[in-house]
Image (spheres, rainbow, N blue to C red):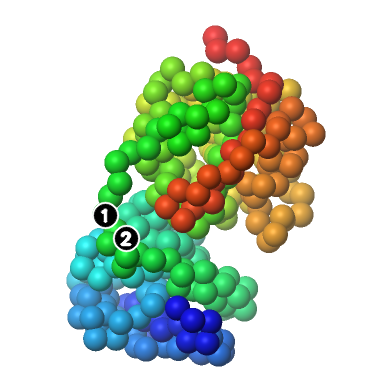
Amino acid sequence: MEQTERIKVLVVDDSFYMRYKIQSMLNQDPRIMIVGDAKDGLDALEKIPALRPDVVTLDIEMPRLNGLEALKEIMEKYPTPVIMLSSFTTRGAKETIQSLQSGAVDFVPKPNAQDMDTVKEILIEKILAASGANLRALKFQERPPISLPTAFPQAMEMHGIIVGCSTGGPKALSHIIPAIPPDFPAAIVIVQHMPAGFTRSLADRLNDRSLVRVKEGQDGDSLMPGCAIVAPGGYHLEIAEGRISLSKAPPVNRLRPAGDGSGRNGRRRGVEASRWENHSRTRIYLHRIWHVQERD
């Protein structure tokens, strides 16, 4: 897409008020053009072929056909970058993680009257980023699972690694982490750019599908071989002498946690940056950890 072209957006939400507010926010950016709205998943599936949006914003909880079901249909029939709108609830967080692993490129918490301006900036930024996802070319066919040793050959020579990822990370992680054997000799730290309230659901879902243990990190946790720790949203994760510490230090590039930030913090405390890979348009940073607790 040329930079001079406006990004066509379809807004899908069962609330007339929310459709109106989202469209009002997006109409303030000259780079974005609202091509239509839909009141539920079935309405969206009827309109996408005619409107041909570049990006779809999709509510999760809707009547007739909810966001998760509609997402699967969109990915199969009309592969289009989708940004989910999610509530800050336990159920909302679980469904958000499921949607990201099913093909949504990103998500934004549903706005309320107090944070409209903040959500507007985030949503516009994510729409601009999502518009570059080439899902039509990929036809969203599932790839075979990729093991961490295959994706990162140096991992087998390390005491531990940090995997840092952002947009598209949950889907990439859903391929990589479940393929790791239970006797994997290195500790794993996952830094997914995600706000508080969602990383616990990410860790729980990965744990249910993986042979290694996956948990949301807590201050003072030891790094152990064959265990993956997910940095909790809203905190930076630092590594010192085989343990993690959490901090409320200022965001790095507006992110907390931040994958590159954890690498820099750890490098002064026994972590050496190694390289990063690109997996399914997801930037994944790989850092080398020197100090890890021995397995019991």
| Residue at the image point whose x is 60% and y is 75% from the top | 121
* Pick the front one: 26 or 111: 26
Residue 181, visible in the rendered structure: yes
Question: Residue 128 appears at what percent x and percent y?
Answer: 52, 74
Residue 103 falls in image quadrant: bottom left
Kind of element beneath mark 2: helix
Question: Residue 156 appears at what percent x and percent y?
Answer: 52, 23
* Pick the front one: 295 or 114: 295
Question: Please, what is the three-letter code of the amino acid marked with disc 2?
Answer: Leu
Residue on which disc 1 sits: 141
Residue 64 falls in image quadrant: bottom left
Question: Please, what is the three-letter code of the amino acid marked with disc 1?
Answer: Gln
Question: Outermost residue, right direction?
Answer: 268
How would you rate the neighbour count of disc 2 (Cα within 10 Å): few for under 14, some for 14-19, many for 20 or more?
few
Image height check: is 147 above or below 86?
above
Left or right, 295 with reference to 66: right
How many badges with numbers are in the image?
2
Image quarter where the C terminus lies is top right
Residue 43, visible in the rendered structure: no
| Residue at the image point whose x is 55% and y is 90% from the top | 30
| Residue at the image point whose x is 45% and y is 48% from the top | 279
Kind of element beneath mark 1: loop
| Residue at the image point whose x is 43% and y is 43% from the top | 173
Question: Outermost residue, top direction?
Answer: 296
Residue on which disc 2 sits: 138
Q: Are marks 2 and 1 in contact (CB under 8 Å)?
A: yes
